[in-house]
Image (cartoon, grey):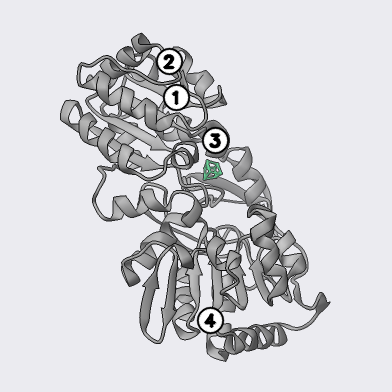
């Protein structure tokens, strides 16, 4: 039986220490990974599937039909790519240019603004290795990695010994949770859990900034000033602090201005970094690849060599306004994840779904191409939640084509 180390693409942590036992191209045992990772790594599948109008066809027919839809569309939408490799994402950007498409990903309604601010050097950040080796104050803000990124606390942020943190979590680290509910992560943080009401983040930030500046903190929801002053004192003493910012924080803010203000004050008093809690294993890669090409992280429209950018090119606004007349969805399920009032417009246009999993979107798609699971059945490279580049090889061979191979063929046929 073969034993090898692999990267898990189950979430934005891209754990690179996964031990796998496989025999005859079947994964028997997965060690080191969390429960999410084990399920993900064992996600090997059977027959490959190419469907047009829900009828089985061969690969060439599916590719030809997909290319024809894109060629005939005036403004196709290309969306998804958070669970695709860098290589696939770069091809999708080229395809969007060639077809004058609108191009967007899930970051346009989640952590995109934070990643953009990091790429523009507007916020101080660090790697997960820095956190493991140096961090003494760790804040989980609107994030519950115990559920979303199960090895976050054990591998990087709280429990491990680090080169400069040999005494570990018991003596040298303080973990703090700021959230609207007592999550599993908040329970680990014990007395350092600060429960705020939904939408209360901006006021809490203002109160915290007041406390950091020696003023009396006040909120309309009457958060005990003493607790905020205690929190401010801990933060002021941080030698290496980090805020892991999650969706709970981002969804509560109108824009990032309060975060910029807080990080400025924190860095006047101490040493603080921010890392976005990216969920999909390569959402950050999509942002970085598109940023390198266009200067924007999402919401773009290519038009005869020109790049347009704005909220009107987001997946949500494009579908709402019905400005797109076809859609190529790669590794995403907008029919399940977007509000029905928005996603129902996908049912009125031809959809091509390229996905390792059957989804609601793939079931309603005119064309469905069932591809390999990247990281398990296909290799490539990706960008971890902290911006670190990671390369990986497939664990098993598969009959499924990678999404990269399919996009290459569609590109040639367009
Ligand atoms: S924490 Fe994420 S990357 Fe690590 S093993 Fe679990 S699912 Fe995979």
Q: Secondary structure at mark 2?
A: loop
User: In terms of image quarters, where does ligand 1 lie?
Assistant: top right
The answer for how far apart the CA atoms under marks 1 and 2 are is 19 Å
Mark toward the viewer: 1 or 4: 1
Where is 122 relative to 355, above or below? above
Q: Is mark 1 within 8 Å of ligand 1?
A: no
The disc at residue 222 is 2
Q: Residue at x 65, y 82 (%)?
A: 66
Residue 17 percent coordinates (x, y): 48, 44
Contact (CB < 8 A) between labels 4 and 2?
Answer: no
The answer to which of marks 4 and 3 sits earlier in the sequence is 3
Q: Secondary structure at mark 4?
A: helix
Residue 377 percent coordinates (x, y): 61, 63
Q: Which residue is mark 3?
A: 150
Mark toward the viewer: 1 or 2: 2
Sort mark 1 into few (<14), some (14-19) or many (20+) by Cα contacts within 10 Å: many
Relative depth, front residue between 286 and 166: 286
Sort mark 3 into few (<14), some (14-19) or many (20+) by Cα contacts within 10 Å: some
Q: Which residue is mark 1?
A: 177
Contact (CB < 8 A) between labels 1 and 3?
Answer: no
Q: Which residue is mark 4?
A: 408
């Amino acid at each position: 039986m073969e034993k090898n180390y692999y990267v898990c693409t189950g979430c934005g942590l891209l754990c690179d220490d996964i031990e796998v036992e496989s025999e005859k191209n079947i994964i028997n045992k997965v060690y080191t990974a969390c429960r999410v990772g084990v399920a993900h790594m064992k996600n090997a599948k059977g027959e490959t599937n190419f469907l047009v109008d829900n009828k089985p066809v061969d690969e060439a027919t599916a590719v030809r039909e997909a290319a024809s839809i894109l060629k005939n569309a005036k403004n196709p939408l290309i969306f998804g790519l958070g669970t695709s490799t860098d290589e696939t994402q770069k091809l999708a950007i080229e395809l969007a240019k060639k077809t004058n498409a609108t191009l967007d990903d899930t970051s346009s309604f989640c952590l995109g603004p934070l990643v953009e601010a990091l790429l523009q050097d507007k916020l101080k950040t660090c790697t997960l290795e820095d956190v493991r080796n140096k961090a003494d104050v760790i804040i989980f803000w609107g994030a519950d990695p115990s559920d979303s990124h199960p090895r976050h606390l054990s591998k990087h942020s709280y429990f491990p010994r680090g080169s400069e943190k040999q005494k570990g979590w018991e003596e040298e680290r303080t973990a703090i949770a700021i959230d609207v509910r007592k999550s599993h992560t908040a329970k680990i943080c014990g007395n350092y859990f600060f429960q705020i009401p939904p939408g209360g983040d901006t006021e809490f930030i203002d109160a915290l900034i007041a406390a950091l500046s020696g003023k009396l903190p006040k909120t309309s929801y009457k958060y005990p000033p003493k607790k905020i002053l205690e929190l401010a004192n801990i933060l002021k003493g941080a030698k290496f602090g980090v805020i892991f910012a999650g969706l709970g924080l981002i969804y509560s803010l109108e824009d990032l201005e309060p975060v910029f203000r807080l990080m400025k004050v924190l860095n006047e008093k101490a040493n603080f970094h921010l890392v976005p809690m990216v969920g999909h294993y390569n959402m950050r890669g999509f942002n970085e690849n598109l940023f390198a090409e266009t200067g924007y992280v999402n919401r773009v429209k290519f038009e005869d060599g020109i790049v347009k950018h704005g909220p009107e090119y987001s997946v949500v606004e494009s579908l709402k306004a019905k400005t797109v007349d076809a859609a190529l969805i790669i590794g995403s399920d907008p029919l399940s994840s977007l509000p029905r009032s928005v996603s129902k417009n996908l049912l009125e246009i031809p959809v091509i779904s390229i996905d390792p999993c059957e989804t609601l979107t793939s079931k309603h798609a005119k064309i469905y191409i069932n591809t390999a699971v990247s990281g398990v059945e296909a290799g490539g490279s990706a960008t971890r939640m902290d911006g670190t580049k990671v390369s990986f090889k497939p664990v098993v061979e598969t009959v499924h084509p990678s999404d990269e191979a399919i996009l290459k063929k569609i590109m040639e046929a367009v």
